[in-house]
Amino acid sequence: MIPRFLDTAYTLMFSMTHTYASARVLHLSIFLSSILVVASFIKDRINLFSGIVFCFLGLYLTPEILESSTMGYVDSGTAGFLILTFVSAAHFIDNQKISNWIPIVIFSAFSVASKYTSLGFVGAIYIVLFIYLIVKFYKLKINIINYLIKNKKDILKFGLISLISFI
């Protein structure tokens, strides 16, 4: 099965409007929203000036990505989803709540469903988060098995969301 998440959205928008402009706007909005989410994340963690500088640098130092996002290629949408996955993982490391796994799973599923080449980056993020959690449990001297048994409802919810997202 070929990943066709954004291709399906592209076809759907073309069939509704009979022009490629709406599909190009979809890809551009995915890319611009990922830039704005990262700028907001930097603004919250550092300051407003750093967020504004990142926004301008993200838009003006990468004109090829901005141009390809207006052509409707799947690569720019996949890159946007990967950026959102990375920011969601950083947010999880900051807050360490089990509910912060949901955006990580959703954005990584969107990126893998768009293009298989993103699987390496998503795998690397999951490996880093897994190692982080093992080190955190080891430092806190928490038995992982007891933690999993105590939070089985949240873990089942996470597993169900993961399964639905990847299907």
Image (cartoon, rainbow, N blue to C red):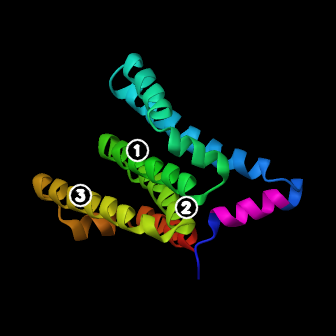
- Specify the amino acid type for callout 3: Leu
Residue drawn 60% across the image and 47% down it: 69
Q: Which mark is residue 87?
A: 1
> Alpha-carbon neighbours of circle 2 within 10 Å: few (<14), some, or many (≥20)?
many
> Alpha-carbon neighbours of circle 1 within 10 Å: few (<14), some, or many (≥20)?
some
37 in the magenta segment: no
- Specify the amino acid type for callout 1: Val
Q: Which residue is mark 2?
A: 110
Residue drawn 23% across the image and 58% down it: 133
**Dot 2: element:** helix
**Which sits in the foreground, 123 or 77?**
77
**Which sits in the foreground, 117 or 164?**
117
Q: Which mark is residue 133?
A: 3
User: Which stretch did the figure color magenta?
Assistant: 6-14
Nearer-N-terminus badge (2/3): 2
- Specify the amino acid type for callout 2: Phe
Give residue 82's position: percent from left, percent from top: 45, 54
